[in-house]
Structure formats: C-alpha cells, structure tokens
Amino acid sequence: MMLTELTIAAAQGGLRRREFSAEELVGAHVAAIDRLNGRLNAFITVTSEQALDAARRADAILAGGGDAPALTGIPLGIKDLFCTDGVRTTAASRMLEEFVPPYESTVTANLLADGAVFVGKTNLDEFAMGSANITSAFGSVENPWKRAGDAETVLVPGGSSGGSAAAVAARLAMGATGTDTGGSIRQPASYCGIAGIKPTYGRCSRWGTIAFASSLDQAGPMARTVEDCAILLQSMAGFDTRDSTSVDIAVPDYRAACGRSLKGMKVGIPAEYRVAGMPAEIEVAWEQGIAWLRDAGCEIVEVSLPYTKYGLATYYIVAPAECSSNLARYDGVRFGRRVPGASLDELYEATRREGFGAEVRRRILMGTYVLSAGYYDAYYLRAQKVRNLIRKDFENAFQTVDVLLTPTAPSPAFAQGEKMDDPVQMYLNDVFTVPASMAGVPAMSVPAGLSASGLPLGLQVIGRSFDEESVFAAASALERAAGFTHRPAVRAEVV
Amino acid sequence: MTYLIEGRDGPWELVVGLEVHAQVISQSKLFSGASASYGGEPNTHVSLVDAGFPGMLPVINRECVAQAVRTGLGLKARVNLESRFDRKNYFYADLPTGYQISQFTHPIIGEGAIEIELADGSTRMIGITRLHLEQDAGKSMHDQDPARSFIDLNRAGVALMEIVSEPDIRSPEEAGAYLRKLRMILRYLGTCDGNMEEGSMRADVNVSVRKAGEPFRTRCEIKNVNSIRYVMQAIEVEAVRQVEIWESGGSVDQETRLFDPARSETRSLRSKEDAHDYRYFPDPDLLPLVIEEAWVQDLAAHLPELPDAKRQRFQDEYGIPRYDAGVLVAEQATADFYETVARGRDPRLAANWVIGDFFAALNRTGRTIQDSPISADALGGMLDLITDGTINGKIAKDVFEEMLESGESAAEIVERKGLRQVTDTGAIDAAVQAVLDKNPDKLAEYRSGKDKLFGFFVGQVMKAMAGKGNPALVNEALKKVL
Amino acid sequence: MSLDPATVRRIARLARIGIDESDLPALQRELNGILGWIEQLNEVDIDNVEPMVGTGHAALRMREDVVTDGDAREAVLSNAPDAAGPYYTVPKVVE
C-alpha cells in the first residue's frame, strides 16, 4: 500500500484499524520530503524528528483503543505564516529568518489538539504577498506538475500558499494549512490540482498567524479531496476570544455536508467573470462544471455582479494599505533581523531595506502612499466604498442563488520567469479569487480537469457568509463528476 | 477680568486650548491582559500583544470603555453609542507596533463642558470638544548606556483618555482652573488618579495670540507639560514669544514646542522637513465599538455625586458659605471626612474645625487626609464634648493637639488630664475671690473706672482654674462680685 | 496622479525603508504602473456609498478587566536582537 497516496479520510480508518501505524504513515511522508524537498523547495523548515516523535505518541493513543482525536497521526504541512511554539516561523522573509515564536497560533493549536502531526513549515511568498511563490527569501517553489511533453520547464505552484499546494500535490503531506488574502489558497490549489477552501472571514481565528492584510486574511485547509478539506476545516475553525474579528457561530458538520444532495440548489453564473481574453479552455472547463451541477439537480441561474471588475484594483489599495501598517512592527528592535545604524532612523531604514524583499517593499510603499495625507480620500476611502459595493453585489446575488460557480484562475500554472516584469500582470492572476475575499464570503477551488497542456484547472464555488456547507456540497458534486485522478509528474512514489 | 498681553502696538488677547492625556484607572491594559499598574520590574507588565509580536491581536477591555463613558457623563458630554478605533502610524522606539490604536474620526465621547471658577469668584464655561480612548507608549531611558537607549514597555498599551478642550481659555489662570477642575472631576469619578508627577495626567497646550475681535491666528502646541504650574508658565512665556514675533513683522509657524521650566522658555521640538503624516485608517483588527444605551444609563445611575453638585448641596444642606463648601469638596476624601464629622452635629462648627485646625494640622505634619492621625469620628467626638459643655473652645484646641500627638480620643484625654470644664459655681466663686485677694491694686483701679481690667480678671481666673472654667459662668461670677 | 521622485523619497522615508537614488527610477515606474491601473476606480459612482467598516457580522466584543497576561519577560525578550538586561535597546535617541 502506498501510504502517501491515501486520503486523510482513508488514513483515519486505516490507523484505527491498525492496518498501519502512525509512525509508518508519518515516516512515509518524511521520507518523501527527504527525497523531493531539495528539488521542490516546498518546505522552509522540516521537522522530521518532532514529527516522528509525535507519530509514536499518536500510536500509543491509537493503541489505547479509546476515542483518539480525529486527526491523530495525520501528517500535515503548516504554512510558515502560522506561528508555531518553539519552531522557527519565517513568513518566508529574511526579516524573520531566526524568529522562534514562544506561542502557538490558534489554528495550529486546534490541529495539534486533534492529534495532527506537523512534518514541517511550508514555503510561501514573502509575508504571503505574491501569486507564484517566487518572492520567498528561501527560494521559489517548483510546481510538481509538468506540461505534457515538457519535463524541463519549471512551473510556478501559484501563491502565496505555493509550498503547501506543492507539498500536498506531490504527496509530501496529506494536507496543509494555507492562508488566503486575495486567493492565496484557491489559486495555488488550482495550479497544483488539489482542493482548497477559504472559509468565511471570521471562521478561523487569526490569532498567532502573521498578518498581511487583517481585514482579508483567513486561514483554510488544502488537501487532495473536498472531504479532506472538510475534515481539516472542522478542526481549524472555531470561535476564539483572542481575535476580535472571530465570529461566535457554531461550526457545523462539514464532512456530512460533502455528501448532501444538490437537488433544488440554485447555482449562480456571474456574467462578469467572462472576462475579455480568457483562454478558451478555461471557458470550456467552466461550461463543463455548469453541466455537471445541472446534472446533479441544480438550477442554473445567470446573475450579475457588476462591481466585480473593480475587485482587483480595490484589493491593490486595501491590502497594501493594511500591510504597510501591519509590517511596521518589523523594525529590528524586539524580534527579527536588525541591521545596525548610527541613529534610530538609520536602524529602521537599513533593517527594513535588507529585511524585506522587493515585492514586500513595493507593497509597503504603495500602502504608505494611499494612506498619506491628501491621498487617503482618493484612494483608500474610495476603495473601501467600492468594496462595500462589491460586498452588496454578493449579497444581492445570494438573495436568489445558493452558490456561485466561476473559474478559479484565468490560466493554468505558468512558467517561472513569466509575468515577472510587470507587477500588474502578476496581480491579474487573482482576478477571480479577489472579489470573494473583498466580500468575506467562503470560496473553494476544486480540480475540474486538465488544460490542453496537461495542467490542472480549478473551478471555484463561492457561498454565502458562514454557509461553507453549501460550498462543500457543490464542490463535492463537481469532484465526483470530474473524477479527477490525474497526478503530478513529481510525487512521492515516483523515484 | 480680561487677561491681555501689552505689546508695543497695543494689547493682545490669548487663546488657549488644552489636550489632556489622562491615564485610565483599570486593572489591565486597553487591549491586552497585562497589568496596567504603575511600576513593576522592566518589561514585566508586558504581554506579547503589547510588544507587537507577529500575529498578536487586540481585544478591548470593557472597564476602560466604562471609564471613558463615566468620564463623558461627568463632563456632561455626548456619549457616542458607536465609535471606532483607528491606527495612527508612526515609527518610534517606544511604539512597538509602529502604530498607536486611537480614535480619530469617531470618538466615544463628543461635546461637553466644564465650569471653572476664578480667584475673583467669577465663573466661565470651557467647552470640551471630545474625549477618546487610546494606548499609551512605552518608556525610553537615555542615561544607562553611552551608545544606546533602553526600552521598557510596561506602560505600552495602558489606556489613556485624551480630553480635548475648545480654544475657550483666555488666561493662564483659566488654564490652571480648568486643569484643577478637570482633575477634580476625574478623581471624583475614579477614572484617573490625576497624578501629574507620575505622568498619569499630562497636558498638551495649544497657544495663539490675536488682537481683539480677530479670527484665530496660527497656534503652537507645547507638548507633554507635566504640572499645572508649568502649564500656566508655558502659556505666559509662549504668548509673549508670539507677540514679539508678530510685532516684529514675522509670523508664527505652526509647530510643536517643548517647555523648559529651568530656562522658562519654549523651544521648537521638530524640524519642518520631518513633518508627521500619521496615515490614520480604521484598525482592521477591531470592529466598530457599539455600546448599549441601557448600559450607559446604568453607568450614569451609579456615578458618584460630582463636585459642583456636592458643593451646592453643602451650601443648602449644611448652611455653610459657598467658599467653605468649595474648599471642602476640592477632594472627595475631604468632603467625605467633613460629612462624617458634620453628621448629627453643628455643620458650621464642623466646617470651621475641618477647614481650620484640622487642615492646619495636616499641613504641619505633612499628612494627607487618608493617613490622618485623627479620624472623622474622633474629631466628631471632640465636637460633641464642646457642644455638650464638657470642654470649652480653648481647652478643645489643647485636646485637639493632644489627639494629634497620642491618637487618643478626646474623651480619654479629657478624662486622663482632668480637662473637664468646671461648672461648679462654688469652685468658680472661690477662684474669683482668690484672684481679687491677690490683686487689690487692680481691683482699686477697676473700681475707679478702668473697665478694661475686666478682661484681666477673666484671664486670671481662667489661669487659676487651668483654663477649665466655663467662660460664661466665670464672667457671670466676676460681674456679680465686681 | 503620478509619483515624482521626491514623492517616492518621501513615502520611503515615512515607511522607514532605505532606498538608494539608483532604486528610484524603477520604483517610480512600478508604482506609477500600479497607480495608473487602479485609477479605473475613478469611474465608479461612490456618491452616498458608505465605506466598508468591519465585517458586518458583529460588533466589538469586550473582555473583562482582569490581569491574565504579562510576567513573561523571558518570552518578551526571547527574540530580541540586542537586549540589555531586562531592556530592548535602540541607538541612542537624543531628545
């Protein structure tokens, strides 16, 4: 049995039936990491020893025969944006190269409490700012997928949760945590042929997760099946008094929602997502998804989200503005990199010049500008008003439909080196994912098929606030219809 | 009386507004669970939230909000049921996150007013523009290392109320009266201890000058003045500086200045090229603060009686003069002390004793009313002895001094030292006779018309009786014999 | 609106990010490219539109006034690049 091929749902059963031990399961993934991480660079920090220790403890619990917590012995990758107690947490930045948090984020603490085993901290774009995982101070991540007939070209895994997506796709972990600010879970999931959900803003606590843009950041799971995402989100989600934006609403049974019938569900198709210049194969995949949902008993409804097209421009004001303030704490005084300076300001300027990479510096400068005296109204205030219009678009649509179906990204994974000269071209990758982030509603990417070049394409299901259940139900139906069994060229069992 | 600065070209009027930073009395900080108490070993009253660690988030303290609402109610100000928190972005060594959480566009408290009273007895209303909640910064120490400043974050994140006045103040005296009155109100409310020496209350002073009838001219802000006396001095010297600039044809620059008490001058704090741009925006880690009207009503119902109301009540209920009432309500503890003494007794006698001998004794011994060696009940006990004729007023002064020394009750002292007033007419008559016998020459003078000597005889009789004679009875006995 | 080099210098100064004169042209070009692109928002009619504040799901929760944190100087200083005894340090600030 290839333990690295199992789903989390299957492994839960296998562990409890003692078909294999947690040590074997975790060991198989640790071995895969040893073999492939040098190439893929999906992990910044690998915690093999701790993981194997934890696996042995998990085996002791499983041997006890009682009720082992749901994720006992399940090996996961943790995006290196979640602070982990005693384990270096870098945000993929030189600034935090040596940072060891004396605390555990709420989301990872929830997973640990449920028995999960962390095999390492996954790579990402620096401070989660990027769409290709090329801004990491610890090097780019390679997408384990290859274009058909082209084993050479290195493709990007998407970003910012590119390390998590690559690790799960290549079978180095059974699942991983991601964070999504404008598409950072969904877009890499789409590029790497896995599933990933950004839950409703306020569903997962942000406490202990390094902030990029506080009003948008939301943690979520990435895994190879929709059901596995449901299992992981069940553990990650929940009210937390330490996060003032966490919402006190009970977490429903997500796994049960995956099997729910779609009879009578209304699915909205937003006209505005048919953007000019969208590749035909994306259009085809979308039409296929619509047909699958219709076949599953859904009613398909054309809807309009007229302000969607302003989502991206709005995002690139709001997110940099918040990041410029959130990242002011990295000043070389209390933690992180410090570059000496003769004066306080020289210390700040040298530390922040050397500690941050080019994209982070660019976004901080942009955010500083749009908040500065004389420009606040023209940029930030205007953007927050447009954001309200975008949110109302979704509210209006959800008056008549239960979920929306769109493509996740306007293209399959592209090659490293493409789209890199012009920041705006790079930002356009997020055109379909950003609007849901702006509105705070849940959205999930699920693999739907392959492009002509043999690369995975994802479809996105967007739901009402706090109705992840409908999202899981629709995404599961798509997953069943798609029967996506393709696997990437680079993966654990391929030597 | 109008305060005017006499310039070369005529008089100038003073315009002052005050921004007071008052530290909120609470157990824990505004957005973290670390202790808000003063002192502590360096960096021990600090949570990772206060130190701005990655991923740390603010959660607001209900009591700090309640304190702001109480203060707003005490200033008769509008309470905004919805307010917001903004980030004020700037870099400084003692500001861990690179921004201060404050309330910029939507403060919790809106317009209110304070009535101040001046030395000549006149009163004026000074408008309050707003009150908002914000975080205090940490502390930098510059004298412990030749090359480095040391940072202690114990104060970082403690709740402050910034209380902004309208530019209604027209003299240094009014500024002093405003600050004293504000401090009195805060102390009564228990929302700030008003201790300017420890920095729990500090003032930023906005000063400008103008000719009568003109609109406002450019103002300067004098930052962080830490005593009422310095505020008054700073206003005085800053106004003179500005008048000199205008009169010599220059113009005053809007800038931040610092008051140097040693040199009695203000000087510019920041150069213009480094002008601040705080980039305020709503803090995305915090939702709008919405409070219930019913909660505000409940806080209002439990407010203590405030100084103005208490002063009026003292006048009405105890029949004491307005001035005395003002002195007694200056501090809550004094007012409580007085009321305990006055309860069931002659309130005027109580006021005279509290304001007179009691205050003098505190002054002399350097004690406060909290650690006074004479309790209100003890003082009341002594007044009872006066009222029921056990001791006379003169003996009472000695008993009072003895109470101060020994801490004994008045009754114990009177008993122990035998100070009970003598009302036995036989004993008084005997003493009178003895004095007359001893002073035949004075008696002759008196009888030959020197009436003034009556006082001499009273004094001699009282002396002979060691002060214990009932003065009325002594007078009576003397008159009879003489 | 378009950024001139002086403005780029000013915002870099506000953000305390050191930049070399040689960085300026590229930064200016990139930032202007982004700004030019986001100008599309100017075509949106925002009259009578409120800015988005919070999530719309809840008001701010308040915690009770209890000391639950602190007394953790070791953790507070655990990552300090230049601690001196119980303190953080910065280059001497002249006031």
Image (cartoon, coloured by chain):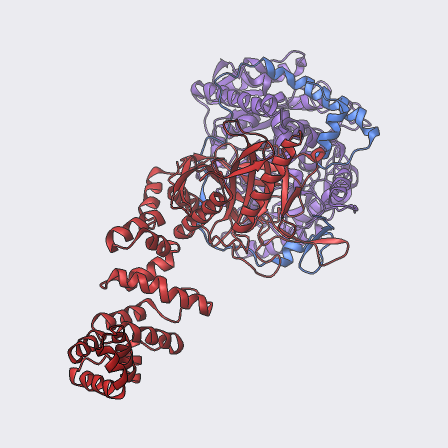
Chain colours: A purple, B red, C blue
Residue that sits furthest to the front in the current view: B448
Residue A253 position within the rendered picture, expressed as x and y whole percent measured from the top left = 46, 38
- In this figure, what is the number of numbered marks? 0
Residue that sits furthest to the top in the current view: A276
Residue C19 position within the rendered picture, expressed as x and y whole percent measured from the top left = 79, 33
The residue located at (35%, 69%) in the rendering is: B375
The answer to whether B85 is drawn above or below residue B203 in the figure is above
**Relative to the observer, which residue lies in front, B157 or B420?**
B420
The residue located at (78%, 39%) in the rendering is: A354
**Relative to the observer, which residue lies in front, B312 or C66?**
B312
Among the 4 quarters of the image, the one containing residue A271: top right
Q: Is residue A238 visible in this depiction of the protein?
A: yes
The residue located at (79%, 46%) in the rendering is: A342
Q: Horizontally, is B130 left or right of A283 in the view?
A: left
Q: Horizontally, is C77 left or right of B296 in the view?
A: right
Residue A348 position within the rendered picture, expressed as x and y whole percent measured from the top left = 73, 42
Among the 4 quarters of the image, the one containing residue A79: top right
Residue A220 position within the rendered picture, expressed as x and y whole percent measured from the top left = 58, 36
The answer to whether A80 is drawn above or below residue C36 in the figure is below
**Relative to the observer, which residue lies in front, B357 or B379?**
B357
The answer to whether A412 is drawn above or below residue B132 in the figure is above
Q: Is residue A161 visible in this depiction of the protein?
A: no
Q: Quadrant of the N terminus of chain B?
A: top left
Q: Horizontally, is B461 left or right of A228 in the view?
A: left
Q: Quadrant of the C terminus of chain B?
A: bottom left
